Amino acid sequence: MNILLVEDEARIARRLERMTRAFFGPQLASLTVCESLPMALRALHTAAPDLLLLDLNLNGQDGFDLLKSVAAGAFHTIIISAYTEKAITAFAHGVLDFVPKPFTEERLTQAFARLTIPTAKPENALQFLTVKKQGSLVLIEVKELRYIKGAGIYSELHLLNGRKGLHDKSLNKLTQLLPASFERIHKSYIACLTQAEKIIVQEGSRYQLLLKSGQLLPIGRSRYKELRSKIN
């Protein structure tokens, strides 16, 4: 686990570093602390972390500028900020959690646990996915997704209009962020259940999900029963 901590208050940065090291223990390979946006951007361009811990007020600079620039990244982001009125916007842009200041070790631990332990979807769910296109960042509304297909370490977004986009986050990471209407139906597929027509059962205990578009997606055997209860 490589973690980048962006926090301009030295006292809080030391506290966060101590709690982070205590939680991850030997899993933590490196922890880099930056006190400004320029330092954070240089660190991100040098080596992308597995987790970004980000304050939103950095000596008067807006941490959202950094968040927007890295929203298409493969890593997760946890916001730690006193600006709770920005939580809805932060979740809409794909952060894993928003920890309000002042924070307790219990609340920070809860946020860290979301990296490895399945939890309920956040109330303010992801509304946009950011993809890189021709050197710029493009926002795709989650409601425009039909399904997502794993493409190695990336994810291939299939849209209602027939277009595709490539996202840097893996299926596992997107599963943690997407609203409850999206279901992991196969090791290589996430489907939007509002686009599901029915489940087709084939010989040899093989299952497929028929979408309203007429497309067929494979269903993993271990996921069939749970998916059937949700479709019915």
Image (cartoon, rainbow, N blue to C red):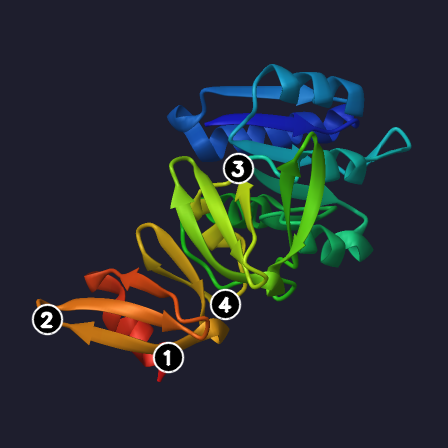
Q: Picture quarter containing residue 216? A: bottom left
- Name the quadrant containing residue 119: bottom left
Residue 170 visible in the picture: yes
- Residue 124's place in the image compared with 94, above or below, is below
Locate residue 189, reporting x and y percent: 37, 55
Residue named by callout 3: 168
Earlier along the polypeptide chain: callout 2 or callout 1?
2
In primary-sequence order, the first of circles 4 and 3 is 3
Identified by mark 1, the residue type is Ile
- Side of 9 where 13 appears, left or right: left
Residue type, label 2? Glu
Secondary element at tag 4: loop
Label number found at residue 12: none
Instruction: Identify which amino acid the numbered label 3 is placed on.
Output: Asp
For residue 231, the mark is 1
Q: Position of residue 29 (x, y in %)?
A: 45, 20
The quarter holding residue 220 reads bottom left
Labels 2 and 1 touching (C-beta < 8 A): no
For disc 2, the marked residue is: 203
